[in-house]
Amino acid sequence: MPQQPLAQVPADVKWSWQDVAACLGRDVAMFFHPTNERGRTRRRREVTAKSICFSCPVRVDCADYAIRAREPYGVWGGLTETEREAIYASIPIAHYPRLEGEGARVASYAIERALAPEAFTA
Ligand code: SF4
C-alpha cells in the first residue's frame, strides 16, 4: 500500500495562533479533500474554505506553518495544496525564513493572490 506523504513539522512550531483561528470549531472536512474529489466539487469546497481564511486574523501564521511543514493536504492560510506547491517551486524550503525576509515576501504575495476576489469564483 503506498504511503501517504506526511507533514514535516518544524521543531520550533508553536500552535497558539490556532486559539483565535476563524476555523476553530468548524467542520475540518471543509479544508481537506476527500479521496478522489475533483473538478467543480473540489473547487467549491476550496472556495468555501478560503472564504473562512479570508477573515482569519492568523492566516499568515497558518500559511507560514503549512509552508514550513510542507503540509501535503488541505487549505491553510487561504492557500490550497496546489498554491503551496507553487511556493515550493519558487523558493528552496530549506531557506524559507519564518515570517521575515524572502520567504515571508513570497508567502504574503501568494496569500494575497490566493484570497483575491477572483479566487472566490467557483
Ligand atoms: S487561515 Fe484558514 S485554515 Fe488557517 S487558521 Fe485561519 S481559518 Fe483556519
Image (spheres, rainbow, N blue to C red):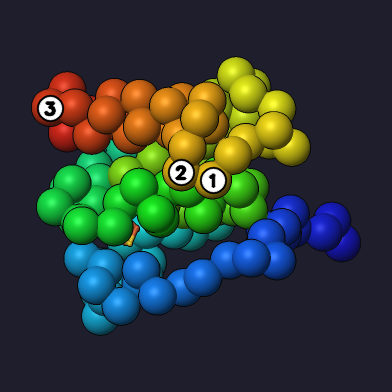
Q: Amino acid at mark 1?
A: Arg
Dot 3 or dot 2: first in sequence order is 2
Q: Which residue is mark 2?
A: 99
Q: Is residue 114 above or below residue 79?
A: above
Q: Which SS class for mark 3?
A: helix
Position in image of residue 74 (x %, y %): 47, 53
The answer to whether 77 appears left or right of 95 in the picture is left
Quadrant position of residue 11? bottom right
Q: Is residue 121 above or below residue 36?
A: above
Q: Which residue is mark 1?
A: 98
Position in image of residue 79 (x %, y %): 39, 40
How crowded is the residue under tag 2: few (<14 C-alpha within 10 Å), some, or many (20+)? some
Q: Which SS class for mark 2?
A: loop
Position in image of residue 110 (x %, y %): 38, 28
Question: Is label 1 in contact with label 2 (beta carbons under 8 Å)?
Answer: yes
> Would residue 121 be seen by someone viewing this image from the given angle?
no
How crowded is the residue under tag 3: few (<14 C-alpha within 10 Å), some, or many (20+)? few
Q: Which residue is mark 3?
A: 117
Q: Nearest the camera: 32 or 19?
A: 19
Question: Is label 1 in contact with label 3 (beta carbons under 8 Å)?
Answer: no
